[in-house]
Image (cartoon, grey):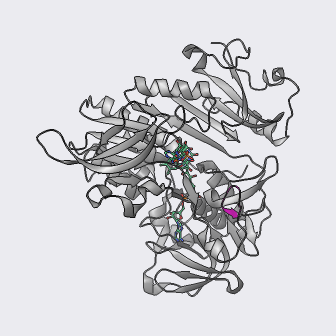
Amino acid sequence: PLSSGTDEQQGIPASAFFRELSNTSVPLCVPFVIVGGGTAAWSALEVIYEKNPSAQVLVVTEEPYAPYNRTPLSKEMWSIPTVSVPNQWPNARAELEYKYHLPGQPETYRASILMNVSVTQLYPKENKIKLSNGMEVFYQKLLLATGGKPNVSELINNSSIDPSIHDSIITFRSISDFERLHNSFINPKYRNITILGGGFLGSELACSLQTRLNQEHERNKQVTLLCPEAGVLGKFLPRYLSDYITKQMRQHNVDVRPGVSVFDIVPTTSTDSSDETRIQLQLFGWKDKEHITDQVVIAVGITPRQELAEEAGLEMDPVAGGIRVNAAMQVEGNIYAAGDVASFWDRALGRRRVEHWDHAVVTGRIAGENMSGGHATYEWESMFWCDLVGLNISFEATGMIDASLRTIGVWNLKNTFRRGEFSDQDLNEGVVWYLRGNQVVGALLWNREGKGLDVARQVIGTKFQISSVQDLTNLIPVQDE
Ligand code: FAD
Ligand code: NAD
């Protein structure tokens, strides 16, 4: 399979792997240019160097870091004790850092990197990009691994927010965002942190933050999660699982308010003697019409960063969004795209776009392989995982995971099926199959540490059609413990 399988404990850290360029030392022409500082960029780079250790690669990222892994930002980064000491949290950065694993001397395969620089324009006919520092670079092969930008609703449009609370309303995607949120989190003046959105980011962050508060016996701080759905992760999970998570999060002390939308955010003054400025959220759909907080984290999805390709006239996906690539991750000619930004052709499931880590690895590697002259195509259905720290809930999934699809759950009830009502004990471990018509298009493995993923991939890859729900009973057996 085209997955990286790297051992995070060894290898050369990404920061040592790159040769940082100054604005004045940018080469005019480079064989491989990669735009982006995330997982897809890193994965493509790994393959390019596996194929040719003396390859010349330029990575351009607008972030002040070498490509890194975002996934610990909503999980592990909150549980590392050193992060509670300001200025010491960079010790924990190893959690985020990719490592390179080629044998031999690192000097022979150092890539060049431009940090704090963005690519502002793409000229496909001239094989050229323009950079924010005004320089231009010609490429032979180009990878667009630009990921996604956090959404902010009209309401939170920067210009409409009162300047006194502006800095306390953030999105969360990068190391810099982590630093900002962490500063608020450890500030005793911030008594409530409110997360807007009940998707993967909102649910993981709420659990991780609350777990820290529980561990530190901190009773003066509260984490609130507001989401428009009837329950947490309600956009992705069947209702009974979403209800179960919502209940578990409440038992964990997270103040979860489902079915809520926010229609205004204004400054307010603290009612106690401190007279401090706080933030008032005006709510629809909840018994309290107002909610007072000190920090708002907006986690309401992302929009693919396709603007470079779009302005250059390349093909977009009007349905799923993103840059349209074929199964080889090729946009056209010598331009490739991978990761969150790519709308790709999945042989089993058709055209789609996926916003998860393993997908960025798989597609980044395919792109890197093909940029190096290979012939890889997307055949290995990627997976994702979600960890709700402190709840003892984690799940892995592959294929299409969407609550609007029909689902069939197999739980540890001596392999009988139940639809609808479950007791909490029933939900220790199970498999949820997602169906489009009668075709199995997705599988979610609940508290199974990934056991059954290969079978699920096979079932999805062969476009398995069920004739009755019993067809799914023993595909991935769920043991009665
Ligand atoms: P990104 O990682 O977003 O990288 C894109 C990069 O391109 C960024 O560095 C950006 O600044 C840069 N860029 C964009 N435009 C330009 C430009 N014009 N010029 C220069 N640079 C540019 N997935 C899971 O499967 N499991 C998880 O547990 C999980 N946890 C997550 C936790 C968090 C907090 C977040 C934010 C995401 C998580 N994900 C998880 C999702 C996963 O991290 C993403 O799917 C993955 O990062 C996508 O990689 P990418 O390379 O496509 O994009
Ligand atoms: P998401 O797509 O997972 O969830 C979006 C959520 O935003 C919805 O479920 C809904 O609750 C909320 N929402 C949408 N419109 C809203 C509105 N107008 N007002 C209030 N709420 C609204 O996106 P996310 O949770 O923001 O995560 C960001 C990105 O990071 C996604 O690509 C996600 O896949 C990725 N991520 C993945 C993982 C994981 O795979 N374990 C973890 C964290 C983040």
* Residue 124 visible in the snapshot: yes
Q: Which residues are magenta?
A: 317-323
Picture quadrant of residue 217: top left
**Closer to us: 349 or 43:** 349
From the top left corner, tell me how far across and down residue 44 is, in percent. Answer: 63, 63
Main secondary structure along the magenta-highlighted residues? loop
From the top left corner, tell me how far across and down residue 221 is, in percent. Answer: 27, 35
**Would residue 470 be counted in the magenta stretch?**
no
Residue at figure coordinates x 69%, y 37% from the top left: 404
The vertical placement of 38 against 470, above or below, is below
Picture quadrant of residue 331: bottom right
* Residue 391 visible in the snapshot: no
Q: Is 148 left, or right, of 139 in this rendering?
A: left
Q: Is 99 left, or right, of 352 in this rendering?
A: left
Q: Is 219 left, or right, of 53 in this rendering?
A: left
Residue at figure coordinates x 86%, y 33% from the top left: 465
